[in-house]
Image (spheres, rainbow, N blue to C red):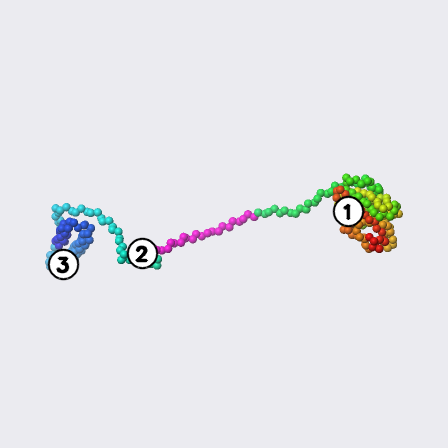
Amino acid sequence: MAIQDQLFETKELSMALPKVKFVALLPVLLVTATACAYNQGATTTTPAAKPSAPQATHQPALVEPSTHSAPEAEPAPKPMPTVISSDTPAMVPSRETSSVAPPKAAPTVPITTVSIAKETITEPVVEAVEITPPAPIMIDISDQYTAMDGPVPVIENAAICNSANPELRIVVERVPETKGMIVADLHDDIRENFLKGNKVILRVRTNAQQGETSFCIPLRTPGDYAVAFYHDKNNNKKFDKNFLGIPKERFGMSNNPRFGARAPKYEQAVFTVPATGADLRIKLRKASDILGRQN
């Protein structure tokens, strides 16, 4: 009956305080219910201290219906905002005591390097090609040959100069008398052939005229040439010399080089003939002039 009495007391307390909010009485009800449950457990499980006394059978208490209506449940109170006074220190987490973990670094993704073989482009090899100039047009002058002196073609008293073809227009100076022949030996551009009798490419013989003798030497093509001259005074078709090898007849050379104990070199006598031909003036010399340095 003790538990029932407590419940009635509680109910009377609730009726006596109708204006008290149900929320305020909730802790009291919880504590009371807990105490009742504890007392009930102690009554049912704990044996009596005196075995001779009869144990009272506990029956649930009958609750009489109350004539009072139960108070209406009020809505739960709204949470009140927390007011922080000036005296209350602000609970601001400092940087030193902050337990916020730093952001985790992004996981490292392994990078696989893929080697791509570059295509090798081979540039075409341009070989230096020596461009050979076209061969010059060769003019046939064989119809002017009057004789052959061994392998050397000979033209005596050449025709009048023809400006339409490459040729040498010659004027020989210092001809002592009108006697014999003025001989001109034409050499090509091969240095080793210079002043060799069997390497002469053309020999022209013209009647000597005292003072100056003029004539033409026809050419097959323009190019480099050298010419040696002498006055065949006795017309024996030879360049006469004494037993010492000193010339007995007058002589000369293209470019009029200086003579000495030896004949001039090829480089001193060579000259270039264009397609329009060339003009030469040759001075004849004699051995006594060379020995006396009267070149």
At label 1, the amino acid type is Tyr
Residue 235, can we see it?
Answer: no
Residue 85 picture location, percent across and down: 26, 55
Residue denoted by label 3: 48
Q: Dominant secondary structure of the magenta stretch?
A: loop
Q: Residue 238: image x %, image y %?
A: 86, 48
Q: Nearer the viewer, mark 3 or mark 1?
A: 1
Badge 1 is on which residue?
Answer: 225
Which of the marked residues, 3 or 1, is nearer the chain's N terminus?
A: 3
Q: Which mark is residue 92?
A: 2
- Label 1 residue SS: strand
Q: CA distance from mark 3 to mark 1?
A: 162 Å
Of discs 1 and 2, which sits in the foreground? 2
Q: Give the quarter of the image for residue 204.
A: top right
Query: Could you tell me which residue is drawn at 78 percent across and 40 percent down?
Result: 163
Bounds of the magenta segment: 98-120
Do labels 1 and 2 touch, CB within 8 Å?
A: no
